[in-house]
Image: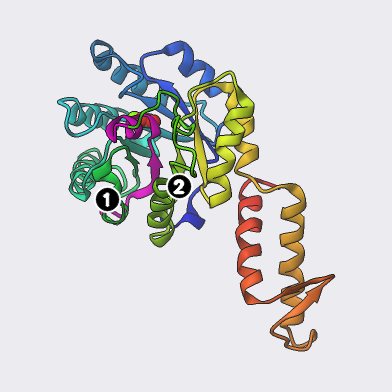
Amino acid sequence: MTTSQLRPRRSCLAVPGSSQKFIDKARTLNSDQVFLDLEDACAPLAKPGARKTIVEALNEGGWGEKIRVVRVNDWTTEWTYRDVTEVVEGAGANLDAIMLPKVQTPQQVVALDLLLTQIEKTMGYEVGKIGIEAQIENALGLINVNEIATASPRVETIIFGPADFMASINMKSLVVGEQPPGYDVGDAYHHILMSILMAARAHDKQAIDGPFLQIRDVDAFSRVAGRSAALGFDGKWVLHPGQIDAANETFSPLQEDYDHAENILDAYEYFTSEAGGKKGSAMIGDEMIDEASRKMALVIAGKGRAAGM
Ligand code: GLV
Ligand code: MG
């Protein structure tokens, strides 16, 4: 699927698959996506029970328009195949995508694709319907991000996993998303975010920023989310209900920008038409607009329309 066919993922709510209470609460919230977690938010001994809880929660429904995702454990563990098999056999008809953490190579995506295809065929589901969300959480994953994005047509999103990433490169910091103390010459995440964004844009995938752990500081969340949103990211994880509105707002255009973008598109349509003189460029107030301005306006208008503005 191309990004224009994908539903918005401005806010992607993380919910421990082992917590019935948090799952019930998640149904009532207005995040664009919910992902039920079998990985790091789920203790090893709780994983078998969580698989069953997740299958029931998906089949019970009540998720509205939310994109329904399950994060499985990564392929270096012994849990991945059972996570995928139990969840997709049990609830594949009520599931939109599997999130694969700590992806390091395109082969790991291919392995998941093959397993999903087997299960879809066995269960009589539409083959290829279940998407893949690939999390980039270490140096090898980042180096291979271009190949990971193209490893399967199922890949819908590339996600930055800052906590694991910071740990894996030995970054001297304990605060996810904030600049590491001592690095005062720029943004320590710029290269990582841009590499993920370039792979996503080159291959028409969504780029998603990861979690911000200081859950009570919504202003700090908005500041950090604002950076990836400004670059062009499509959304960010949220760990707490209080972060959802901030994410939805940050990854939607400002109303005035949205209105301006629609004006540019209307004006462009007119001045390039027969009636408007078949012109290649024209002025709106003090601003000259042309085909490139139309493309920029389409991005903002597209984000606004997807957000229901
Ligand atoms: C998310 O999985 C992260 O490691 O930041
Ligand atoms: Mg992680």
- Distance in Å between CA atoms under marks 2 and 1: 15 Å
Q: Residue at x 60, y 68 (%)?
A: 295
Regarding ligand 2, which quadrant of the image does it lie in? Answer: top left
Q: Label 1: few (<14), some or many (≥20) within 10 Å? A: some
Mark 2, secondary structure of its residue: helix
Q: Quadrant of residue 199?
A: bottom left
Q: Label 2: few (<14), some or many (≥20) within 10 Å? A: few
Q: Position of residue 136 (x, y in %)?
A: 33, 41
Q: Position of residue 35 (x, y in %)?
A: 42, 30
Q: Amino acid at mark 2?
A: His
Q: Position of residue 288 (x, y in %)?
A: 75, 74
Q: Which residue is mark 1?
A: 143
Magenta stretch holds residue 50: no
Mark 1, secondary structure of its residue: helix
Q: Amino acid at mark 1?
A: Ile
Q: Position of residue 65 (x, y in %)?
A: 54, 36
Describe residue 12's horizontal placement relative to residue 251 as left or right: left
Q: Which residues are magenta?
A: 151-170
Q: Residue at x 48, y 43 (%)?
A: 185
- Mark 1 C-beta to ligand 1 under 8 Å: no
Q: Earlier in the sequence, mark 2 or mark 1?
A: 1
Quadrant for the N terminus in the image = bottom left
Q: Residue at x 34, y 36 (%)?
A: 99
Q: Which residue is mark 2?
A: 190
